[in-house]
Amino acid sequence: MKNLEELFHHLLKDIYYAEKQIVKALPKMAKATDNAELKSAFEHHLDETKEQVDRLERVFEIIGKTPRGEKCPAILGLVEEGEEVIEKGEDSDVVDAGLLAGAQAVEHYEMSRYGTMIAWAEQLGYAKAVPLLEETLKEEKAADQKLSQIALSTVNRKAA
């Protein structure tokens, strides 16, 4: 990568891959939880994530590139951690707490990436991409807040 534009494109491919992995992981997480509120949050965020993938495809179009993902080791590690919680969890309340914590780790990763991409899109003059990225960042922050509320109101208490 020789310049910020190439780095932006690389990060766009990275987050595109990540969002597609999240689309695959969320149904498994929803199925694995016994907590109705957490299941609902996962299902709601699945719908949002599908829209986020669509938005990213529009960003690719704005920068004149074909939508294509690039393997994202960070998201693969986070997804693997979630699978491990499902596999090794012996108590459903503990599984719920682990899944919720893993989901928040994913949200924080995404918030970091989208914040960076917004700044770079502004710097590179991709003005039409900025509101698309900002909308997704807003959704990721809301998802994280919802997960925190669920954690504090029920999940963590039950797991303890």
Image (cartoon, grey):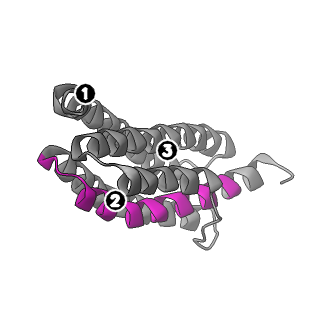
Q: Quadrant of residue 63?
A: bottom right
Classify the position of the C terminus by image quarter.
top left
Main secondary structure type of the part rendered in magenta: helix
Residue 128 visible, this angle: no
Q: Residue furthest left?
A: 36
Mark 1 residue type: Ala
In this figure, which residue is indicated by the disc labeled 1? 160
Mark 3 residue type: Glu
* Crowd class of label 1 (few under 14; some 14 to 19; many from 20; radius 10 Å): few
Question: Which SS class for mark 3?
Answer: helix
Q: Which residues are magenta?
A: 10-36
- Figure check: 143 above or below 73: above
Mark 2 residue type: Leu
Residue 26 circle label: 2
Q: Quadrant of residue 118?
A: top right
Q: Nearer the viewer, mark 3 or mark 2?
A: 2
In this figure, which residue is indicated by the disc labeled 3? 110
Proximity of marks 3 and 2: CB atoms separated by less than 8 Å: no
Q: Earlier in the sequence, mark 3 or mark 2?
A: 2
